[in-house]
Amino acid sequence: MTPVWRYGRPALVLLLAGLAVGVPLWLVAVTSAKPQAEAIKPNLDLPRHWQPAANYADALAEGEMLRGFLNSLLVVVPSVVLVLILGAGAAWVFARRKSRLVSAAYALCISGLLLPPAVITIVMELRQLGLAGTRPGMIAVYTGMYLSTSIFFMTGFIRAIPMELEEAARMDGATPSRIFWRIVLPLLRPVIATATIMVTLYAWSDVFYAFFVLGGGDRATLPLNLYQVASAQLYLNNWHLVFAYVVVMSLPMVAVFLVGQRKIVSGITSGAVK
């Protein structure tokens, strides 16, 4: 391998990645600061007249972002908590029990990594249960969708935890629930951090499943709320408001990712490799 190719290949990969990510981000950022006349045809040019404060204020007011933000929190936070608790409990059983039935159950649980959810079937089942168009129904969908990922990573991590820790606790009279909450769960912090970030990122930006389950209205999450106001022509030819909405909606997830980016890598390698 020549020195030029050896050092040029990483530089080329970084350049392509920077273009793929940086160009759309730049387009969103500069368009959100332009007046309507300049933003009719979005481009990469800097604004001739800057008005980011007015654009963001209009997006907050006309797009009802505060209501959408609250709805997103009421859906995403319970979903993440359920994914973590149910995933950790199931992973503990799968990692410590050895039988054909347990192996079959584990294979069934992680099959969700490969098999896409059947949207029509999900909606029909939620209607039968009376959960269609409700937050509990949306929470159930997100929990079922991302539980497989949580179980997969946590099972691999728990298998690397020495059994002697749990056996010593049993000899001291600890119950299984106490062992789980006081020993197993604290040791899962790297994977829990990773699962929290991943599930939050996916659920926060989801509009496809929210559209079919919630259907809009007062319970619309932030992405679904943006779809509603855009399709209702409230933002017709107002790309500056659309992109301002996108920027504000993305800020919480950008902060979450920047804080926990190292945890993502360490948690994935710990759960998948060990």
Image: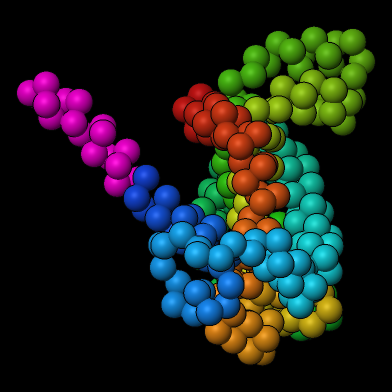
Magenta span contains residue 7: yes
The residue drawn where x is 53% and y is 79% is: 37
In the rendered image, residue 76, in percent from the top left (x then y), is placed at 75, 56
Residue shown at 64% from the left, 19% from the top: 161
- Work out whether 204 lies above or below 151: below
Q: Main secondary structure of the magenta part?
A: helix
Q: Which residues are magenta?
A: 1-17
Q: Is residue 162 above or below residue 203?
A: above
Towards the viewer: 63 or 99: 63
Q: Position of residue 223 (x, y in %)?
A: 66, 69
Q: Is residue 143 visible?
A: yes
Q: Is residue 142 visible?
A: no
Q: Is residue 115 a member of the stretch shown in magenta?
A: no
Instruction: Identify the image quadrant of residue 189.
Output: top right
Would you say 104 lies left or right of 131 here? Answer: left
x then y, percent, for residue 220: 76, 74
Identified at 62% across, 46% down, the residue is 254
Q: How many marks?
A: 0
Q: Quadrant of the N terminus?
A: top left
Type of colouring? rainbow
Q: Residue at x 57, y 29 (%)?
A: 262
Asked whether, in this view, residue 217 is left or right of residue 227, the answer is right
Place of residue 25 in the rendered image (x, y in percent of width and height, measured from the top left)? 48, 55
Q: Is residue 197 left or right of residue 268?
A: right
Please tell me which residue lies in front, 135 or 206: 206
Q: Quadrant of residue 177?
A: top right
- Quadrant of the rendered structure where residue 178 is? top right
